[in-house]
Amino acid sequence: MATDPRLRPLGDAERDQLEALLDALPPPLDPLDLSALDGFLVGVLLQPRTIATDRWLRLVTDTDGRPAPPGPPLHRLQALVQRHHAELDRAIAARQWFDPWVFDLDADAHGAPPLPSQVVLPWVAGFSAALEAFPALLQIDDAALREPLAVLYAHFDPEDLDDADDLRDLIDDIAPPDSVAEAVEDLVRCTLLLADISRPRKRA
């Protein structure tokens, strides 16, 4: 456990505070929600070269990068986000399990539970937003990228896969997860597989 309070993992109360701060941002700002934020940070951290904090942090409070109102609430929001970024960075660097911020959804109007892909889709959408803003990961010439990317992008509706045409053959062969637990496990597994390519660990 990190002893520096700036590196401490967020507790439940701090995560709730972060959610409230994101929700309180005024229109026309379009901030990421918690699940999308978690996926977005993973997408930022998987880049082969470190992205400067000011470049990705502004996209958290508005997907178009418009500036948020300055002041203590923004400073607190940014501090919490950077702590979570550091937590994920440590987990990915050590190839350790982390708990994606994925949340239960309500049943539909007919009482049917949500599909696993629906539950993890906000996380994958945040991940995809990071790769759209910072495409260096996708530009790595390594066939080993294809399978984990296809597993993640398979959660999207096929009509929303215009930017993943080169993965479509793989996506079509991927069976949907049987449970939310399996879908969440895939998020972590694919993250670490991608890290092996974009952030290879140095041999001792």
Image: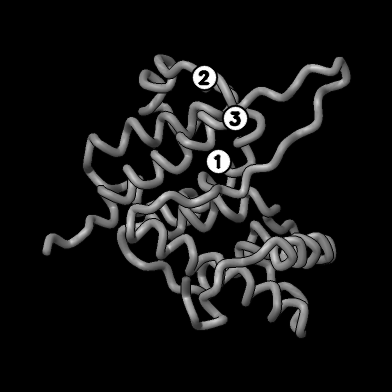
Q: Quadrant of residue 23?
A: bottom right
In this rendered view, identify the residue nearer to me: 185 or 142: 185
Q: Which residue is mark 2?
A: 176
Q: Amino acid at mark 2?
A: Pro
Secondary structure, mark 2, is loop
Query: Position of 153 compared to 78: left or right?
Result: left
User: As displayed, is residue 198 above or below residue 145?
Assistant: below
Q: Which residue is mark 1?
A: 124
Q: Quadrant of residue 79?
A: bottom right
Mark 2 or mark 1, earlier in chain: 1
Q: Residue furthest left?
A: 204
Q: Amino acid at mark 1?
A: Val
Query: Position of 72 compared to 165: left or right?
Result: right
Q: Give x and y (percent) for residue 172.
A: 43, 16
User: Between tags 2 and 1, which lies in front?
Assistant: 2
Measure how far apart labels 1 and 3 are at the Cα level.
14 Å
In this rendered view, identify the residue nearer to me: 82 or 98: 98
Measure how far apart labels 2 and 1 are at the Cα level.
14 Å
Q: Residue furthest right?
A: 109
Q: Residue at x 78, y 67 (%)?
A: 21
Q: Give x and y (percent) for residue 12.
A: 70, 61
Quick one: quadrant of the C terminus?
bottom left
Q: Quadrant of residue 48?
A: bottom left
Q: Which residue is mark 3?
A: 180
Q: Do residues under tags 2 and 1 come within 8 Å of each other at their CB atoms?
A: no
Measure how far apart labels 2 and 3 are at the Cα level.
10 Å
Secondary structure, mark 1, is helix
In this rendered view, identify the residue nearer to me: 71 or 115: 115
Secondary structure, mark 3, is helix
Mark 1 or mark 3, earlier in chain: 1
Q: Give x and y (percent) for residue 86.
A: 48, 69
